[in-house]
Amino acid sequence: MLYIYGATAHAKTAVDVAEDLDIEIGGLIDKSLLIEDVFDYEVQLHHQVKDAAENFFVAVKNPGLRERIVSENPDWNFQSLIHPKAYVSKRAEIGEGCIILPGATIAPDVQIGNHCIISGSAVIESNTIIEDFVNIGPNVSIGANVLVGRGSEIKANTHIEDEETIPKESVV
């Protein structure tokens, strides 16, 4: 059973991907009292873990806030959502709590940290490291041997050349 933390636009995307993967969704969790449901899934204010088989996905786009939510819930099992129309090499490593959207291409020897967002049609070439809590926008192209630092955001349609280093918490 999957619970999605968040109830705004990114949560709706996570719901779509989870449904495409035939993952049972138990509901959403959000601190807003204004949102009662998302696509007919109930939105709860709080959630107490009842079963070790429960998994969570933090559907919050802001990397700093996403990191805070993860750190506040150390007992949660975080699940990655990799859309079936994304290509992920069997030689790539994907951390927990990531989402990889349709059309994304992840080459061999790519390491993607925990709780990253890889948007649709993003391309990440080999020997690249994406650290934790990074957002990669749609149509981003990242060359080989690149390091993208923790908490960074690479905005839509950006091209990062081979051998670049993006410092942590950067916006490119």
Image (cartoon, rainbow, N blue to C red):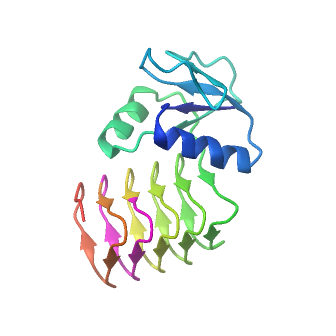
Q: Does residue 148 belong to the magenta stretch? A: yes
Q: Residue shown at 34%/85% (left/top)? A: 162
* Left or right of 170 on screen, residue 87: right
Q: Nearer the viewer, residue 3 or 42?
A: 42
- Give residue 32's quadrant in the image: top left
Residue 14 percent location from the top left of the image: 57, 44
Rendered position, 101 above or below 52: below
Rendered position, 9 above or below 127: above
Q: Nearer the viewer, residue 110 or 30?
A: 30
Rendered position, 155 above or below 41: below
* Left or right of 78 on screen, residue 157: left
Q: Main secondary structure of the magenta part?
A: loop
Q: Does residue 7 belong to the magenta stretch? A: no
Report the magenta residues as a range. 136-151
Q: Residue shown at 33%/73% (left/top)? A: 158
Q: Residue shown at 55%/77% (left/top)? A: 107
Residue 111 percent location from the top left of the image: 48, 66
User: Considering the image in quadrants, where does the N terminus appear?
Assistant: top right
Q: Residue furthest right?
A: 22
* Left or right of 87 on screen, residue 127: left
Residue 53 percent location from the top left of the image: 71, 30
